[in-house]
Image (spheres, helix red, strand yellow):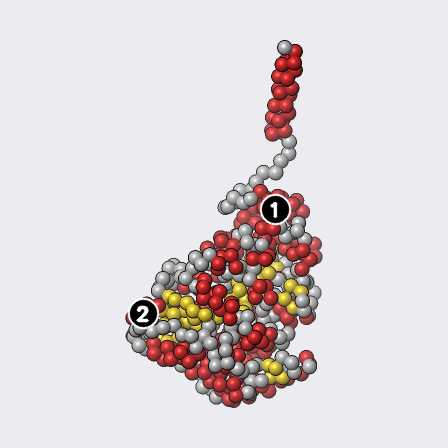
Amino acid sequence: MKKRVFISVGVIIVIIAILITYFFWPRFEKPKTEVQYPNEVYEWARKIKEKYSGTTLTIAAVAHPSTEAFKVLTPDFESLTGIKVKWVVYEEISYFDKIMLIVTGEEVPYDLMYTCAEIIPGFASQELVIPIDDYLANKELTPEWFGFNDLIPAYVNYMKAAGKLYGIPFAGETIFVAYRSDLFAKYNKEPPKTYEELLELAKFFHKREEGLYGVSIRCAKSWEAAWSWISFTYGFGGKWVDLETLTPKFTSPETINSLKYFVELTKYGPPGIEAFSFEEAWSAFQTGKVAILVESTAAAPGIEDPKKSLVAGKVGYVKFPKGPAGEAAGVWGWGLSIPKGAPKEKREAVWSLIVWLTSELNVDRYLENGGIVTRLSPLKKMKNPYDKAILDTLEAANSPLSQELLKAYTLPISFEMTGIVSELTSRAITGELTPEAACEQMNTSIEELLKPYR
C-alpha cells in the first residue's frame, strides 16, 4: 500500500513540474508567418534574431519579375528574424551606371546588391564585391534546406571569378525561341531548328495577318543589342575576341556575316524594334503582335500568365536554333552579392537574407510569384510548357562554342565592351552603318580596351 502511495505522489510531483515548466519556463514562440515552416527553420531564424533583430538591410535591385517575387518572401523573413528589409529599385537600363558610381566609393549605402554575369569578373578583380565561399561552408549560417547542390551549375558558374564565388544566382537565363503554336498550327509550320529556318519563318509570318509581325528581339542601344547579336555570332563561327591573344575579331568574315544575318532578322519585327529592351520585346509577343520571340528564358513565366499575356496557353517553346558552325547558347542572369563597402558587422545578417530569398525551401513560392528559375528541381518536375526547352538549351550551353561565347562576354572589360558593341549594332539595324562598317568600328574601339590586359 505504501508503495502505491509513493508512486502516486511521485506522479503528482512530475505532473506539477511539467505544468510549471510549461507555463513559466521561457520558450521560443513561433512568429506569425504566411507559411508554416519546418522546426529547423524557426531554430535558424531564432539565432539570427538574437543577434540582428532591429537591423535594417538595404538592397540595390532592378525592376524585374524576380524582384516582385522576392518582395513576397520578404515579410516572413522580417517576421522570423526581426530584420527590416528596404528595397531600392532601379530601372535596368540605368542600374549599371548608378551602381558603378556608388559601389566604387569607400562607403556604400547598400548592404546587398544585384549583380550579373557581365559585371562579376570586373567587380571581383577590383574587389568591389566579396567572395562568399566561407559563408557557404559554414553549416550554421547555411543550413541544409538552402540546397546549394540544387542550383544549376551553369548559373552558379556565371557568379564565379578566379575560382571564387561572388554571389548566388537567382534569375538564370539562357536564350530560346517562343512561338505562337496556334499560328504555326494554322499555317502548318514547324518550329525552327536552324538559323536559316528562323529567318524564313520570320519572313513568312511578317504581315501574314493584319497587325502581325514576324519576330520580336531586343535591339536597344544600352547593352541589349549586343546580348542579342552575340547569341548568333558564335553559331556562325565568328568571334568577338580571341581569348588566347586578347585581340578583337569583329572583322572576321564569320562575325560580319552574323551581324548581316541579325540585321536582316530585325527587318521582320514591329515598328520601333531598334529601341526594344526586354520589356518591349516581351510585350510585343505577349500582346499577340508577333509570331516568334527570340528571348531570354526569363520571359517564359510572364508569357504563360493570363493576367499579363494575351497568348498564354497558345505558345510553344524550343531551344535556341543551331548555326552553320554548331550550337551556341550562352547563359546569363542575375545574382545577389555583398558589396565590399557595406558594413562588416551586418554581413552575416545579409547572408541570412540571401539564403532565405534564394533557398530551395522557398523556391516554389518564388516561382509561383514570377521568379525566374535557377534550380534543377523545379525544371525536372516538367510542370510548365517551357521547362523542357530550358533544359535542352542549358544542355546546348555546355557546347565548346557556348563556353567560348560566355568567356568572351564576361571578360573584365565586358561592361564597357557591350556598351560599344550595342551602340554600333543599333546603328547597323537602323541603316546608319553597314554591318561591315559597324564591325570595323567595333574592332578599333575594342582594340583600345584590350591593350592593357595583354
- Point 65% across, 14% down: residue: 3
Q: Is residue 85 above or below residue 211?
A: above
- Residue for badge 2: 185
Residue 108: x %, y % from top left = 65, 62
SS state under label 2? helix
First of labels 1, 2 by sequence position: 1
Q: Which mark is residue 53?
A: none
- Image position of 338 with respect to 420: above or below: above
Task: Give the image location of residue 183, x and y in percent.
Answer: 32, 70
Give me the residue at 62% from left, 46% from top.
44
The disc at residue 45 is 1
Inspect the image, locate mark 1, and give the three-letter code of the amino acid beneath it.
Answer: Ala
CA separation in Å, label 1 and label 2: 52 Å
Residue 306 image-quadrant placement: bottom left
Depth check: 174 or 443 in front? 174
Q: Of the residues shown, which amino acid type is indicated by label 2?
A: Ala
Q: Residues within 10 Å of mark 1 (few under 14, many from 20)?
A: many
